[in-house]
Amino acid sequence: MNRSAMRTLVRRRILEETADDWTDDNINDLINVAYALVAKTVRKVDPEAILHWEHRDTVAGTSWYEKPEGTRGPAFIGLKGTAAVTEYVQLTRAAYHVARSNANADETVYCHRGRYIGIFPAPTEAVTDGIEFMHAPTPTLSVDTDVPELETTLHYAIVCWTAMLAKGDGLEDDTKEANELRRILADIPDDYGTNDLGQPLLVQPDVSDSRGRFGSRISNDRDPGRGD
């Protein structure tokens, strides 16, 4: 469902199919707020549900670089030390007081400071797209054809949350939207949290090394002898 379709559904829920109190731009703003709120709920189950890749140019001798706008935290920060290098080397995070003293270019580290990251030691060469950020952004829809980066059923959660935000400006009852939103959000664990449906991670204890009470050995198919 794209932004245009969601806006149409929002207008139906707030009983304003033709713009009156709410312009399209007003509703678009609320849709983005609702989108960010639904995405935040998804991240409670899967922090990497929405990831973006962005890049920054490095400047020789400069350690500080602004993070991508709206980032909720990086999943990977990589550096190309020279223009001739084709792959990004993953940087290790360090505390600021540790990072700023690092002079070992073979073990370059980064640290956080507000909207910036610091790279120490500083790059020695200006490289286009020298820094790669894989990060969790605050998602937005910029044009009417944009579609949320969420499972399809959650698109309607954005509609319901947007309608609730709009109704919050008046005296309209939002109980129906709240109940519908609650039902949809409750199913998030069914769609997120398992990265590989075909290769789940299973706990498989080694029963061949099992021990009974008081250290007695238990017979099993790998150790068929009698227990002690």
Image (tube, rainbow, N blue to C red):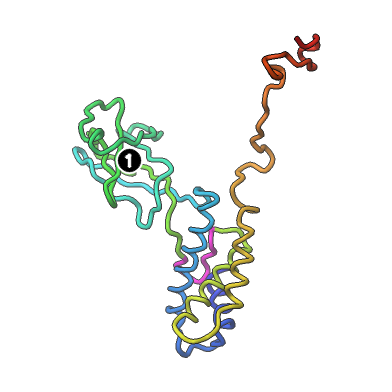
Q: Position of residue 164 (x, y in %)?
A: 52, 76
At a point 51% along the width and 74% down the height, the residue shown is 162
Please identify the quadrant where the C terminus is shown. top right
**Magenta portion: prevailing SS class:** loop
Residue that badge 1 annotates = 130
Label 1: few (<14), some or many (≥20) within 10 Å? many
The picture places residue 50, in percent across and down from the top left corner, at 50, 52
Give the residue at x 62% y 60%: 186
Q: Based on the displayed image, in which of its 4 quarters is residue 111 positioned?
A: top left
Q: Quadrant of residue 125?
A: top left
- In the image, is residue 27 above or below residue 184? below
Report the magenta residues as a range.
Answer: 141-149
* 74 sits left or right of 154 in the view: left
Whole-percent x and y of residue 115? 29, 52
The image quadrant that residue 100 belongs to is: top left
Membership of 147 in magenta stretch? yes
Is 133 rendered above or below residue 28? above
The residue type indicated by label 1 comes to Gly
**Residue at image x 48%, y 63%?**
37
Location of residue 80 with respect to 57 vertically, above or below: above
Q: Residue at x 40, y 45 (%)?
A: 74
